[in-house]
Image (tube, helix red, strand yellow):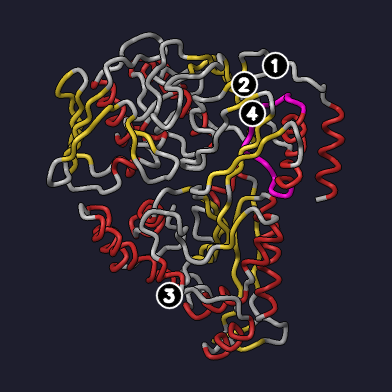
Amino acid sequence: MRRLLTALCLAAVALPAVAQTPRNTAVLMREYDADRYDPARSTARSAGEVIYMLSDTLVSMDYDMRTIRPGLAERWEVSPDGKTYTFHLRTDVTFCDGRAMTAEDVVYTINRWIAPATRSPVAWRAGPVKEIRATGPHTVEYELNEPFSELLSQLTLFFASIVDRATVERLGDNFGVQGFNGTGPYCWVSWTPRQDVVLQRHPTYRWGPPIYENRGPAQVERVIWRVIPEPTARLAALQTGAGDATQYIPTVAIDQLRRVPSVSVTTQPNYLWDFYMAFKVDKPFVSDPQARRAMAMAINKPAMVRAIWSGHATAAVNIINPVALDYDAASDALVPGFDPPGAMRLLDEAGWRMGPDGVRVKDGVRASFLVYGINNLDNQRQSEIMQQALRRVGVEMQIQLFDATVAWGRMSTQEFGAVFLSYPYFSAGDALNLYFQSTQRPSPNRMNWNSRETDAWLATSRSATDPAQRATALANVQRQLAEANVWITTAREQLYIGASNRVTGARAHGLYGVGMYKLLDLRVVR
């Protein structure tokens, strides 16, 4: 911490006391860039934070991550059988090129999203679509083959952003790379990869989500999303006003930053972004449920989280965050607590005997596994702490962390026994359907979890029109996974937005990990 804060002070000295940013421009800082800005073809948070400003969705999500609010649709109805949603669109919406948006744009966007040719990794989020049709210039019928209980929530995500057909067809594979035409509060100006995305205010925009005081940009004419990979440089820019806001704040610096007079730090209690280690349950050693349970008992998660996240994350118990919709509290009681002596007894009882090198063995198989992950500071520190804890009970954890450019490919293979990842979600159903359906093997179901019971409960949860039935089905899955110890969920990240005193109105949101959503209330005051 001392090294980071010293570097922060030195970096601040090197920057001008007053940022040279025009009065009507806001500079939003982030750590990474995206590969493209096409809603249907990118799942990166760094894509979503820009796409939410460039475009709109049919419906929007409130700060509680549960309540659905109007978006491009001012109202909607659902048929009694839960299979048909009728969306009534606003009549005053235009794209950035000035063309009026109609129901045909919605039909085109959803059909493009789910088309096999698009190869969208998140097409399943659109539900089991039967047909999307325009029944009038501003009316859309969204018909499903079967009910999809979370359709409205899924349609708040940036993957469902409405796009202009002519621009998509003109740019082809370069849509979201060389240009964009959406209905959002800001319009595409330019993108210099790994540097800046520049957006200009959409002059007629007045149809933003009702969670904002202002339904269009309050005052900011231009937004620059600037990539600053070094955390000390981001923090120094925040203090001097060279950058206006960021959600990418090292946890080690949060308390210090709160004491800086020129910076405000806000948070969002309903943020859902979790860290976990998942076991590939058909690999030697980690295929043993008793071994997985013993490993969970060997790790002091509260102490590890304090050490890594400096008090700005909470230690997790089971897979689902208690603030999430359809969280099952009873499942948490099924997850074992920190108990190294108990872990050693459990391994002994399961037949894993201590070998001469301090690693247990059973039937010629060593208590050893290989874990993959992305090479970042959180994973480096998690893996080191967990490696040491497991070694004390006779388990060898080998670690291979990769650069993000190659990690996703390696984590889609069958080479490893466990994997470190983190992810956003908005409900129990969202998380569990993403990772634990057998049809999602080998990715994102990297565990190769294959259970008929799980599949049946998840199918029930997706098609349930009764919230109580959905909650019961999802509770069954949470309890099953807790008893099987398929994941060791380690930490629940907290969201912080740091803003310089040059701006106001940078309230943290957090949908799908995006802290700075549309920022319609953002103002430059200095």
Circle 3 crowding by C-alpha within 10 Å: few under 14, some 14–19, many from 20? some
Q: Are marks 2 and 1 in contact (CB under 8 Å)?
A: yes
Instruction: Name which residue type carries label 4.
Output: Arg
- Residue 77 coordinates in the image, percent (x, y): 19, 36
Nearest the viewer among 371 and 231 is 231
Relative height, residue 453 to residue 461 (above, below): below
Circle 4 crowding by C-alpha within 10 Å: few under 14, some 14–19, many from 20? some
The mark that comes first in sequence, 1 or 4, is: 1
Circle 1 crowding by C-alpha within 10 Å: few under 14, some 14–19, many from 20? few
Q: Which residue is disc 2 drawn over?
A: 26
Could you tell whether 229 is left or right of 116 in the image? Answer: right
Q: Which residue is disc 4 drawn over?
A: 194
The mark that comes first in sequence, 4 or 2, is: 2
Helix, strand or loop at disc 1?
loop
Residue drawn at (40%, 17%) of the image: 206
Furthest residue in direction top, as rendered: 98
Q: Are marks 4 and 3 in contact (CB under 8 Å)?
A: no
Residue drawn at (61%, 42%) of the image: 496
Could you tell whether 417 is left or right of 126 in the image? Answer: right
Q: Which residues are magenta?
A: 240-252
Q: How many marks?
A: 4
Instruction: Name which residue type carries label 2.
Output: Ala
Quadrant of residue 303 in the image?
A: bottom right
Nearest the viewer among 403 and 337 is 337
